[in-house]
Every structure is written in C-alpha cells, then in structure tokens.
Image (tube, grey):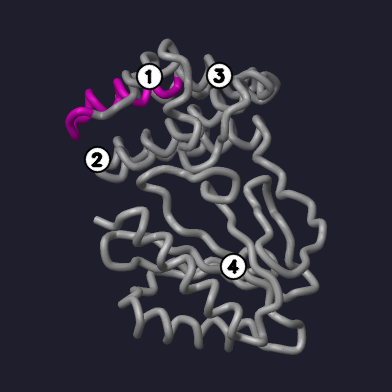
Amino acid sequence: MFSISDRDRIRERVLQMAESDARVVAGAVVGSLALSDGDRWSDLDLTFAVADDASVGDVLEDWTTSLAAEFEAAHLFDLLAGPSIYRVFLLPGCLQFDLSFTPASKFGATGPKFKLLFGDSIERPFPKTQSAHELFGYAVHHALRARFCIERGRYWQAEYWISSAREYALALACKRLGLPTSNGRGFDDLPDEVKKIFSKTLVTVLERDELLRALGAVIEGLLRERGEAEELAAKVESQLRDLTADWSM
C-alpha cells in the first residue's frame, strides 16, 4: 500500500514535469489535499493549464507515456468536464492519481477545493448541485425500475436499482442537512437516526420478498426526506406506495 511519502514524492515529480514543459503555464492542487493534508488514504489530484496555442490532447498523451514509463501508471479512464479533460491513473501501491488539463484561457476553480500552485487562473462559476426535485425524481425513477425488474425475475438488476434509489434518497438527506451530496461523501456524517432508518433498505438476499421489503424501506425513507421536493412528492406518493403492493391478478 502506498505511503504518504510515496504520494508526496510522486506529487513533486509531477510538478517537476510541469515546470519543464513549456506548454504548461499554470497548476493547482484540487480535491482533499487542496485545503488540508488529507489523510492516509487521500489520492493525488493535480490540474494544469495548457497554453492556448498548444494541444491539450498532445500534452495529455505525452504525460501519459512518461507516467507509464516512470511509475508504471495504468490509465483507467477519461472524463470530459466542460473544457477540461481528466485522466485517472492507478499507480503501484493502489495510489489513485487524477490528472487534468484545461486550456489556459479557461483554467480556474470549479469548486472550493482548489489551491493554485503557480501561474494564473480565471474566475469560473461553480457547477450547480442537483436540486431536491431532481434528486427525488431520480429516486422515483429508480424505484419504479426496481419493481419492474422484480416482476421480471431479474433480481440482480432489481438490487442495483434499489441501491441506486437509496443513494438518491440519502443525497436528499444530505442536502437537507447541508452535507455533500455527491459520491456518498456526506453519508457517514448523517445523524445516527437517519442512518438507522436507511440501514433497513439494504438487501440481504436476492429473493422476491426481501427485494420488495427493501424497496418499501427505500420508499419510506425517500418520502421522509422529501423536504424541498414536497410538491413532486405529493403528486407521486400514491404511485410510489403502489410499487410494493400486491400486483397479482
């Protein structure tokens, strides 16, 4: 397993790569290490600006070749976010390294966890978080798909949709309490009474009755957390409750 010193060593080496690459004109730390020391398990997340007369794609490919040769970095996937390209690597010792490049004219913070290391950045609006209406709507969609999968005897897929609906219901709880709503970041900080309610939504065995029970628990938890989505909840509550009814003819 990687150590903090391993992570620091790779961070310094990547910053040296940036310093020696004339195409790279600014850089920043983002994520958990931007505003604090993180913890033993924090990954490495660095973002850079590429001069507007250079190709972001070329820089990314050149750096990928270097990282693979020097650190045996495995390229996992890419993510496009506006003008930025994120490339996620796995390094030996299970260290995740998120590397991103943005044209210099569009380089700036997209959230509060951004610490400029060198160069210049612009002011960019932070992406809006999902509204309560949207979170509730996704949860309803997923609950509906879960019941249909149960009826089709597709129990693995039903469990997927139940879990997905639960995640959106928990995100609603996080939003209500001012906690992070994405990627489960706020779940562990929810009050014990909320976590106790949602612990009942976990599927323990892939059988019809158990899936229906868990789905019902998700629906009850979702309705409890309706909050700012009250108007939508009022329109669909009876149909939500029908999702655990006896549909036999």
SS label for mark 4: strand
SS label for mark 1: helix
Q: Is residue 71 above or below residue 245?
A: below
Q: CA distance from mark 1 to mark 2?
A: 17 Å
Of residues 53 and 76, the one nearer the viewer is 53
Q: CA distance from mark 3 to mark 4?
A: 32 Å
Instruction: Give the foreground label among 4 and 2.
Output: 4
Q: Is residue 212 magenta?
A: yes
Q: Tag on residue 80?
A: 4
Residue 89, how many percent across, how many down? Answer: 40, 68
Q: CA distance from mark 1 to mark 4?
A: 36 Å
Q: CA distance from mark 2 to mark 3?
A: 26 Å
Number of other residues with Cα within 10 Å of mark 2, as a class: few under 14, some 14 to 19, many 20 or more: some
Residue 150, how many percent across, how many down? Answer: 29, 36
Label 1 or label 4, whichever comes before in sequence order: 4
> What is the quadrant of residue 214 in the picture?
top left
Q: Tag on residue 225?
A: 3
Label 2 or label 3, whichever comes before in sequence order: 2
Majority SS type along the magenta span: helix
Q: Which residue is mark 2?
A: 155
Instruction: Give the foreground label among 2 and 3.
Output: 3
Using residue 192 as the reference point, say whether residue 239 is left or right of it. Answer: right
Amino acid, disc 2: Tyr
Amino acid, disc 4: Leu
Number of other residues with Cα within 10 Å of mark 4, as a class: few under 14, some 14 to 19, many 20 or more: few
The residue segment tinted magenta is 204-219
| Rendered residue at 30%/25% (across/down) | 212
Number of other residues with Cα within 10 Å of mark 3, as a class: few under 14, some 14 to 19, many 20 or more: many
Q: Tag on residue 217?
A: 1
Amino acid, disc 3: Glu
Using residue 23 as the reference point, say whether residue 200 is left or right of it. Answer: left
